[in-house]
Amino acid sequence: MELAFQEARKGKSTWLNPLVGAVIVKNQKVIGLGHHETFGHEHAEINALKSLTSISDAKGATLFVTLEPCSHVGKTPPCVQKIFDVGITKVVIGQVDPNPIVSGRGIKYLENHNIQVENLNIKTDLNTAYEFFYREQRPLITIKYAMTLDGKINRDSVKRSLISNHESYLDSQKLRANNQVILIGENTLKLDNPRLTVREEAKLFPPIRAILVRDLKTINKDLKIFQNEAPIWFFTEKQTDQIFPNNVKVLVGNWTPESIITYLAEQKLQSILIEGGSHIQADFMQAKLVDKLIIYLANRVFGTGLSAVSGQTIKGLEFSKPIVKSLDSDLKITVWRKR
Amino acid sequence: MELAFQEARKGKSTWLNPLVGAVIVKNQKVIGLGHHETFGHEHAEINALKSLTSISDAKGATLFVTLEPCSHVGKTPPCVQKIFDVGITKVVIGQVDPNPIVSGRGIKYLENHNIQVENLNIKTDLNTAYEFFYREQRPLITIKYAMTLDGKINRDSVKRSLISNHESYLDSQKLRANNQVILIGENTLKLDNPRLTVREEAKLFPPIRAILVRDLKTINKDLKIFQNEAPIWFFTEKQTDQIFPNNVKVLVGNWTPESIITYLAEQKLQSILIEGGSHIQADFMQAKLVDKLIIYLANRVFGTGLSAVSGQTIKGLEFSKPIVKSLDSDLKITVWRKR
């Protein structure tokens, strides 16, 4: 099973699907290996079967799979049927799939077809957001910012200040790639003029760039955000007759942190990264819509400038002990909200 | 020599003196041990000689001492003379004393009296402030504050907020005990109403409580700071006819960070801890009068309130990679200014 988990971590851009790994064992020897590579591609079990020298080797073999095999027709046919068809006689699963369209049905199908099933019920951080989404019915919300040793996120309010170092930049790129939505406010859009894109590995399913803008008329079409085809979702108050490129979706409403998260949950989005600014972060925190806080702490002092998370008195949030990672001269500090 | 350093660390409240340890060895056996216990008491070498079964055992023995033995008459007679008198034939020293009234003279005296001297020139953190003082001709300046994950040092400006936890409190007590001066501003005095005292171990020579106050008339005599006999030095702009207890010294002048530090250096004070508020910390940082920064980072978010170090744009200060210590739910982050 450990090998199956290792295999699972090879997946990239599995997007709305979880990372899954599978290993086929016969006569105490590993004869097949596979993982779910990318959203829309074959599931781990199928890839493991494909890796066999001959499909007839599956007869009487045991399948180790990190997550309960699916029993529904999605982008691919149900795995449980294939497992039965090729003659697998035992399936050891890492955990039950929290997705209600699978949850328990995969196991039931296998058992109904006289396949022995063992559930190891392993807790893992492999699919944290996926599990969170089905447990809490909303995306996992991470708030992230870089700040100085004196708690500043910007030296002044008219132009962007360099805060964290290159290692933090690389780490925050990975963080973006691991989230399905990146949310910012209009001040951050105008001041920082970010691309909000991610590096190579996530290009296939880049995160949706969600931007809160009061009035879209104030948005300059030369902003870097428009120089990229990744989706842009504007959450705005006013209808507009402006014409945007095809990758832009305009969502008009009286948006609050709650209604934004509800909308994203309805779209089945499992993870959201709130990058700024500090007022939007405070709004989401005050609404208790935060699960994880990541701070890149740079070894500088500004003395003046904007402070992180501001504009709302935050009460009633408790966090876990900080997890610290050294990133050269910066520290990455992670806390989880206690629930 | 390692044993001598261990011995040195047993000293407490050596105040303006460094920590020193000494070991006497004869025929490859340790026959004597001693350390400098407290300011005004015997030096380490003398205590090591006193620990011998008989003083005649010193004849032909080797003395290991962490710091060059003194050659001047201070609170106690010069150690080099005693070392010669008892017949020690070799002295191994950890490092030369940076204090110019000793530096090199102790070694010269011993060599002139036909005692073999070996200098191991060991770098150590045993007497960081003492070494700094004689190298830089001013006290080592540490700025310390507790802040939240969003960089706040107080939830509002009218009453004190609890920020860090009990472990951080205990640690900051040790920090106070290791500094000869604790400096705060009048806002911190009035808002926090601190005692600025330290626990048991430093009671003999408690740090001087230096307080910057524009006008002493505004100071309430019921403040907790007056409920303790440790020295209080008011740095103020206006002469006053108020009568204060005997432990209070009123220093009138047009004080700046530079002139305060010059004054403290003239008083031979080797270490100063600046506890707040954020404006005073910014004033000292802007004047580049900071050597070490210690932050107790608490796992809370305030959203509103005062930000750490504020009121001056800090430029041109660079810091070392942070040293992190976990204090239960808090982090202690230490950086040194790069010079």
Image: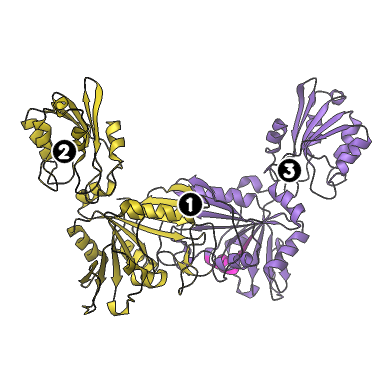
Chain colours: A yellow, B purple
Q: Position of residue A272 (x, y in %)?
A: 29, 57
Q: Secondary structure at mark 3?
A: loop
In front of the other: B181 or A253: A253
Question: At numbered mark 2, what does the secondary structure look like: helix, strand or loop?
Answer: loop
Residue underneath mark 3: B38
Q: Amino acid at mark 1?
A: Leu
- Residue density around tag 1, few if under 14, some if 14–19, many if 20 or more, within 10 Å: many
Whole-angstrom CA distance, mark 1 to mark 3, is 39 Å
**Distance between mark 2 and mark 3 Cα atoms:** 72 Å
Q: Residue furthest left?
A: A112
Q: Which residue corresponds to the image point at 48% horizontal and 64% vertical from the top-left?
A: A152
Disc 2 to disc 3: CB gap under 8 Å: no
Q: Chain of mark 3?
A: B
Chain ID, mark 2? A
Tell me if residue A74 can be seen.
Answer: yes
> x and y percent of residue A331 in the render?
48, 52
**Residue bearing the label numbered 2:** A69
Q: Nearer the viewer, mark 2 or mark 3?
A: 2
Seen from the viewer's position, the closer of residues A284 and B22 is A284
User: Which residues are the magenta region?
Assistant: B183-191
User: In screen coordinates, is B38 left or right of B113?
Assistant: left
